[in-house]
Amino acid sequence: MPDFWEFPTVSMGLGPSSAIYQAWTNKYLHNRGIKDTSQQNVWAFLGDGEMDEPESRGMLQLAAQQNLDNLNFVVNCNLQRLDGPVRGNGKIIQELEAQFRGAGWNVIKVIWGREWDTLLNADKDRALVNLMGTTPDGDYQTYRANDGAFIREHFFGRDPRTKQLVEKMTDEDIWKLKRGGHDYRKIYAAYAQATAHTGQPTVILAHTIKGYQLGSTFAGRNSTHQMKKVGLEDLKALRDNLHIPISDEELDANPYEPPYYHPGMDAPEIKYMLERREALGGFVPERRTEHSEITLPESKTYDALKKGSGKQEIATTMAFVKLLKDLIRDKEFGNRIVPIIPDEARTFGLDAIFPSAKIFNTQGQNYLAVDRELMLSYKEAESGQIMHTGINEAGSASAFQAVGTSYATQGEVLVPVYIFYSMFGFQRTGDQFWAAGDQMTRGFIIGATAGRTTLTGEGLQHADGHSPLLAGTNSAIVQYDPAYGYEIAHIVRDAMTRMYGDGSDGRDPDVMYYLTVYNEPMHQPVEPEDVDVAGILGGIHRVSTSDGEGHKAQILASGVGVPWALEAQELLREDWGVQADVWSVTSWNELRREALAADKHWYLHPDEEPRTPFLTQQLQGAEGPFVATSDYDHLVPDQVRQWIPGDYAVLGADGFGFSDTRAAARRHFKIDGPSTALRVLESLVKQGKLERSVLSQAIEKYQIHDVNAGTSGNAGGDS
């Protein structure tokens, strides 16, 4: 429903985090002069059970630190989870109050309805207040699952003074004592206070009953969540309590399909609601995608990466950061770029933009920075461009979602560029990326320090060998694993056109681009004059041919694996007379998706000419066996097996990683240059083109079983 749901938050717990970062993004838009959001408020409607999710409470401090007085939480405290009480032996409202106040929030409690006011005014020695404060939540749930007589005996009857307070009340009067969350006057007063409060975010803790007005078989029952039908007597009671003009005869006719009631378009309630929605700008929810006009960066912005690195060795992470800096400098579009960094800017070389772009903070910078005299000093500003989220990937993902949907929620394009250690993306916050896809977020997700063997010195928890697989399960993610800077230039430019262009190419713009980049320095070649741009964008292009005499083979590699594929090409040519071509696979995932789409079209349209998958087209006519290598699990390159036009062997780095040098780790996983060469020789042996003895010779020559004999890779770039 792309025109309806504006803020789908999917799993419980994601709503609070999303709301906090949406409010922060609204301040960002205002402070940077992109849009006046000063009159906007963000409301998040949550459950007390939901507040046990780590994301629900784990980012409260940001809202207070950033003075997000445009943010309001309403927590429905019905005291129940799906299975039972939230805090049967405790008091969830007091617990939440303590935590929110401690985090710096304004707290408004709406606990008791106005019917209690007379009793509280008569409670001169505070016996009733004491009883309210010492009764555990489990008891409050039980009271509302029974009747007025039960409450008289088990609540008021626990103290002679409180028992006397209600001695003139009937059981029905006691039953009508509402909780604050069901008193519309008190709720209105709480909302009015919340919107008038400044300098802090506000939380309203509203005491309610789960299944309120649905009858004794529903209200307060542990099974309420699983109950799908209301019984006839409860249905009639609901009708009476809400004064709905439906007769017994109408209900008796079909208890399972009661009639819908509408008071008519001329009813004062309907007129009032329509007038208010018109005054507020339209119906809610409603998703709008019209945004202000933008001018995309010119082609020359991407030229620097096409010139190569000369005599220097540059990691693809640094190549991307160079492009990011150039995009930020663009006079027409640069202010739309929003770098999102979870406390690793210096690792990625992004500290260079601290002084110019500055770090967004609604309070500015009210301290003397320790590095103020350095060129790359840490600078915060109320109008800063960088969203620095601290050590907080969950918060970063929420910021990415809020920024990446600004084109729809605010009518202003912002381009989030979320850069992080690739291991801590889809593995840690995959649910949030799913929610981002559901909300049709657009932007760039940059998995830096990617690969199973490129960051071996910081512990195996950083060894990402599978994030492309996780990303591939999200249909809104377009994943690339580029080897060279010039590939990055074409991918990013095409992504900008797809997500923020005029849409004339017919592609779905509501996608997120996930690029895996590496921290290992390598020579960046100049873009070839005959570069296959369609191949780069489609997922595979040939980067090196070997035209001499001898048996032929094809090596497919991605990302940091391309250099050791070229190493294997040389070993095969020099040592075994085998001529291998090398292909850079920029996207295994996109090759698979396109091929699956071609297959699907064929079986659904059997009378039409079958489409040949792009991968098969690219490799058509290529001689010899095909061998794939990468710095990822076997499953990454193996996912395209059925569309390879020939024998196909796959190398991969499975498991938890290997703590040693890059070269040793690659030898351990058998993905390095010599291992790739060996796999090519094995494939030729299987085809009967080489003698089997060649394999033993190669294993001995390259010392394949010795991890210390590995030479593929270097020690630069914080290995």
Image (spheres, helix red, strand yellow):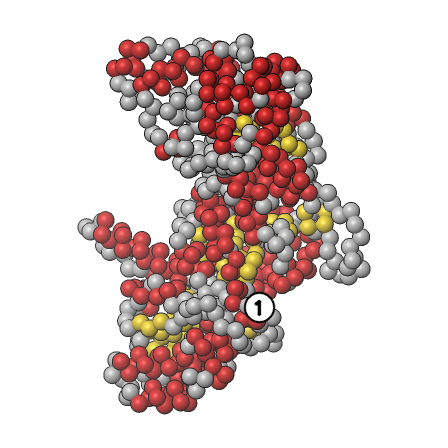
List the residue tagged with mark 1.
Answer: 458
Residue at the image point whose x is 67% and y is 17% from the top: 124
Residue at the image point whose x is 35% and y is 56% from the top: 594
Residue at the image point whose x is 49% and y is 20% from the top: 153
Q: Picture coordinates of residue 251 (x, y %)?
A: 30, 15
Secondary element type, mark 1? helix
- Left or right: residue 698 compared with residue 606: right
Q: Is residue 519 visible?
A: yes
Q: Is residue 403 visible?
A: no
Residue at the image point whose x is 28% and y is 19% from the top: 255
In the figure, residue 623 lies in which quadrant? bottom left
Q: Picture coordinates of residue 304 (x, y %)?
A: 59, 64
Q: Picture coordinates of residue 371 (x, y %)?
A: 77, 59
Question: Which kind of residue does numbered mark 1 sit on?
Answer: Glu
Q: Picture coordinates of residue 600 (x, y %)?
A: 27, 52
- Left or right: residue 45 compared with residue 248: right
Q: Quadrant of the N terminus?
A: top left
Picture layout, residue 259 above or below residue 673? above
Tell me if mark 1 has few (under 14), some (14-19) or many (20+) residues whose alpha carbon lies within 10 angstroms of its own.
few
Q: Nearer the viewer, residue 571 or 663?
A: 663
In the figure, residue 644 lies in which quadrant? bottom left
Q: Pick out the residue farthest to the front.
A: 160
Q: Quadrant of the C terminus?
A: bottom right
Q: Nearer the viewer, residue 102 or 383?
A: 102
How many numbered discs sit on the rendered protein? 1
In the figure, residue 240 lies in which quadrant? top left
Q: Nearer the viewer, residue 28 or 47?
A: 47
